[in-house]
Image (tube, rainbow, N blue to C red):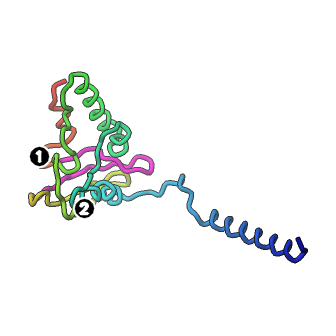
Amino acid sequence: MTMLHSARMRAFIAAIVVVCAAILFITPDPAVAVEQSPGGFLHSIYDHYLGDKAPGVPLKTHAKIRRYFESSLAALIINDEIAAAKRNEAPTLDGDPFVDAQEWHIPAIDIRIERTGDTKAVGVVAFQNFDTPVTVTLELVKLKAAWKISDITWGDETLRDLYNATPK
């Protein structure tokens, strides 16, 4: 290997190191959470309901339930599911709480947010499900950097009322 070739190789390696260091410096750390707005939180849910064959947000695991609902409401849902499974029955929540239905075809959504404090907000989500107008109101609470649902209202019924009315 000649001196000229060796010098070029060192310069090439140095350039690669500089480029890699620059990429590491400008790439955001995924561990650093970006604070989400209440509207962003609701869009992260309702965008999964748009269009044909939309999957929705299945609440099939306790972790998923805890991801979207504040702890006391999550506990109501989870404890009811556990008790229903022991009785070999359907749980109290036997439809999708985000759209108040078991099936959906939603072409568009309208999400409106009213901040009711630094850590509280109310989201009103309006849409047509199979040509039927639906309005869902979600009470939101900010816990640390994450927004969670503290209750859902469909018409004159709430998710918490659903559990409070269920005999144990």
Q: Residue drawn at (21%, 24%), measured in percent from left and top?
A: 88
Residue 138 or 58: which is nearer the viewer? 58
Question: Furthest residue to the bottom?
Answer: 4
Question: What amino acid does circle 2 point to?
Answer: Ile
Q: Residues within 10 Å of mark 1 (few under 14, many from 20)?
A: few
- Tell me residue 73's x, y (percent): 29, 38
Q: Earlier in the sequence, mark 2 or mark 1?
A: 2
Query: Which residue has dot 2 on it?
Result: 111
Residue 152 belongs to magenta span: yes
Query: Which residue has dot 1 on it?
Result: 156
For label 1, the SS is loop
C-alpha gap between disc 2 and disc 1: 19 Å
Q: Quarter-wise, where is residue 24 in the image?
A: bottom right
Above or below — where is 63 with respect to 99? above
- Tell me residue 144's x, y (percent): 44, 47
Q: Residue drawn at (77%, 69%), measured in percent from left and top?
A: 14
**Magenta residues?**
134-153
Question: What amino acid does circle 1 point to?
Answer: Asp
Image depth: mark 2 or mark 1 in front = 2
The dot on residue 75 is none
For label 2, the SS is strand
Residue 149 belongs to magenta span: yes
